[in-house]
Image (cartoon, coloured by chain):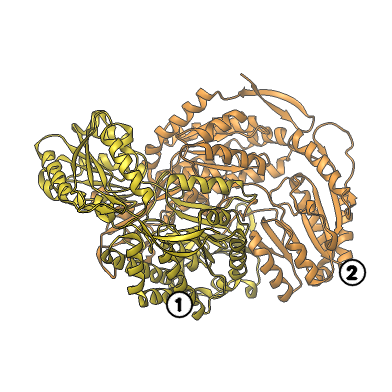
Chain colours: A yellow, B orange
Amino acid sequence: MTDVVSTDPRTGRAVEVVAAETSPREVAALCEAALAAAPALEDMGRERRAALLETLADALEARREDVVAIADRETALGAGRLNGELTRTGYQLRLFAQVLREGSYLEATIDHAGETPMGPRPDLRRLLVPIGPVAVFGASNFPLAFSVPGGDTASALAAGCPVVVKAHGAHPATSQLVFDVMVEAARGSGAPEGALGLVHGLQAGADLVSHPAVRAVGFTGSVGGGKALLRLIEQRPDPVPFFGELSSLNPVVVTPAAAAERGEEIGRGTVASFTLGAGQFCTKPGLVLVPSGAAGDVVVEAMAAATREAPAQVLLTAGIAESFGRTSSELAQLPGVSELARGAEPEQRGGFTAVPVLLSARASSMPVELTEECFGPVSAVVRYDGEEELLAALAQAPSSLTATVQRGAGETDLPGAVVRALRPLAGRVLFDAYPTGVAVSWAQHHGGPWPSTNSQHTSVGTSAIRRFLRPVVFQGAPQELLPAELTDGFTGIPRRVDGVLRTPGA
Amino acid sequence: MTDVVSTDPRTGRAVEVVAAETSPREVAALCEAALAAAPALEDMGRERRAALLETLADALEARREDVVAIADRETALGAGRLNGELTRTGYQLRLFAQVLREGSYLEATIDHAGETPMGPRPDLRRLLVPIGPVAVFGASNFPLAFSVPGGDTASALAAGCPVVVKAHGAHPATSQLVFDVMVEAARGSGAPEGALGLVHGLQAGADLVSHPAVRAVGFTGSVGGGKALLRLIEQRPDPVPFFGELSSLNPVVVTPAAAAERGEEIGRGTVASFTLGAGQFCTKPGLVLVPSGAAGDVVVEAMAAATREAPAQVLLTAGIAESFGRTSSELAQLPGVSELARGAEPEQRGGFTAVPVLLSARASSMPVELTEECFGPVSAVVRYDGEEELLAALAQAPSSLTATVQRGAGETDLPGAVVRALRPLAGRVLFDAYPTGVAVSWAQHHGGPWPSTNSQHTSVGTSAIRRFLRPVVFQGAPQELLPAELTDGFTGIPRRVDGVLRTPGA
């Protein structure tokens, strides 16, 4: 048995043994318990699962102080950020309770029997049902909102799917604590035993995605990690859906008009965005396209000044720190790339420390390496001469979770051309804003074409629940064997009846 | 260059050379043309794409006689069935025109800026956009409705995605004819050149799924074929979504009450269903669970009599005929399995002929091979003693597109238990009906867990369009850079605004 150790990134030292790595036998037992729990979790119905999610949120809030303290000790993300993340996590659980009560997510659809140009049609009634046990992989960079109690877990439980989480090795103690809090709360809410499970260790993660009981996988992490899991899934006799969020460059375009109007503000705001959370956000702006000329110079000088003022930061893990140090140095030495500014050196060495770095290049000679994500507080400012050069540079960018346009007041021509170029590459297009900070709401989406994600819906926003549901049609079913939401006269949720969408009361 | 040959399955002889196999360079050119056509196809908007779909339906109808004649010569499915399939194909195209005009498929969602427990939220507006060029693989068994003009093509074009179809080798002449008809009609509707492409040949199919311009793949075919395509997709630098419909057993349960009430009718109906289209439907009932005892005997005797009366049939290809002959013989020789009845021998040999076969086994000793799909007119009747033995047999069944319960009038207890057992394994649960025949409608779904499909939505029913769309959020966008459906005051389609679903006019 190998110990799972919690490390303090501020010192780089191991602090405590949290658990033993979960053995293959234990993983199997958790998966089988999850499978056994599935019918009872579904049978709780929408209202009782909504109450379960609210109870989980309450329970996490009740342990806020402990959770934030342990998470800060394990991640060095700071109490302010982690308090915000806990609030977000609770909000997300409660939003899915709303989704359950509202009921559209079931996509209840009824076509009555009748004649059609194809001949007689039987009575067909469709809704979405839980897909079965879901494996969730916690992310390194959000110990709460994208980990044990995060969006994957919230949406899967809402859907009625038991969840087995693979704790991220960067914060095993936080994972274990919030898991224990959630299990106790779930028990009190009448959730079946087995509805929540937790495993530790890389091999346990591999065992988890390979287990026959697991019906879908939610993952937030690296392209390499995601591809490794995909390979395991493809080796299953029954490949299951994999919902991965993997990598993102998040290009930013500053138009000449925007540079002229708000150059200083945009420059400082962009540095604040790329250094937020030590540059470990999936939505970190990694490439900033700024026009040549005096107005662009204002943006770049503000970025350089803000970078120099930025303090040294603590990264999550030794691996991230090593990779950041190496990659940011390598990028600075590429032909056509220079280091424009760097932040303050740390007062004392030790721990997984990183100094923010701002790189510089020209669009006409931008090396492709600048368009690859580098986790940590580094970004590249790239100067362009005119629309043609700008669009050529954008054509080199990989797909991303976000793309941002900073435009002048009322400006539409160049922003329109930029959006036409960026929309095929992005899941969210921002105007006059910074990509870090992803609101949880009905309209939100956090995804994009590969490598940002491999799927059409991801773990943020209410459509996250759809990943863990599948359609079932009942043909010619007697009323007493239909789910309540498909019976005649049920008016509690929106339904589509004979092609017409009907809202409750309509 | 290798010739693509059209074969007559009634004689087994090659009839004509349809085309040369599409070369790698030609595949690449078609994919690049598709990519280039994507913006113009999207920009046609919902109304003009709806008109395009209707024009395609009209054009196919106008060539009905030619299309049915060539398809019958290539598939031997018969003019009656093929006329029905053409009607279905046109209906499907027109249904997606309705889907476009109705507009719910866009999932337009608006969250206005405001305060939330997480802090201030920006203005977020989401809708679904076309995913990009789609590769469609025609199926052997539906030369129209699941091939060049089928559900994959209709839903992808509706979504605004250019389509490159890989023609199935079982009906290349039909594929080429309907493709030519569609291209001419599309041109007349103002669709961009490149919106439709066609390739012939296995290697061309492999080249197609590997081409960088292709953003999603729709496939109806065998598990082996699907897995081969999945492997190619996983080797891409950017794996794309694969929507496959692969294999299905379609178990049928006859309860003792149903057997007592309608034994003869159920037995004859089930044979009609498993021999329909020479047993080459993905929804063919391959396993029929009938109670032991006198009432069940009536079902089984009716099945045996109907099978003996069933004429010899012509299968689609030499490969299917060879596989059917070999597999149905092997199954009959398994321990515990016997051949209960077989249809009439053909009057003359030649062509890809098959004689319908009814196998028999007991649930207590059913070999697992009986639960594997065998394409062609063969089915197995399995006798069970009591509910426990029935449920144990169902637990051995793989996931399927459909599962059927034949129940007694007003009977709910045993049917309820059977549905609880079958629903996790099926995408459609039928009562007192036969699984062949899949109505195209809003509520329809044609899928199920692996191996029936590998995805949550498939090519039948209106939600098929969702496979070829992905979400994009606009954050803080000016009105003039938003898609019309997301602008303030637009009321033409259902939208969710600040969490509330609003139908037009509401």
Task: Indicate left or right for B4 with A15 as reference.
Answer: right
User: What's the residue at 29%, 40% (across, down)?
Assistant: A328
**Amino acid marked by disc 2:** Gly
- Pointer 1 local density, CA inside 10 Å: few below 14, some 14–19, many at least 20: many
Q: Chain of mark 2?
A: B
One can see residue A433 in this view: no
**Amino acid marked by disc 1:** Ala
User: What's the residue at 43%, 74% (across, down)?
Assistant: A56
**Residue A199, horizontal then vertical, whole percent:** 52, 62
Residue at the outermost left position: A294
Circle 1 residue: A51
**Residue A473, horizontal then vertical, whole percent:** 60, 62
**Residue B489, horizontal then vertical, whole percent:** 28, 59
**Residue A85, horizontal then vertical, whole percent:** 32, 65
Image: A46 above or below B178: below
Circle 2 residue: B293
User: What's the residue at 58%, 61% (across, down)?
Assistant: A27
User: Please, what secondary structure does the residue beneath circle 1 have?
Assistant: helix
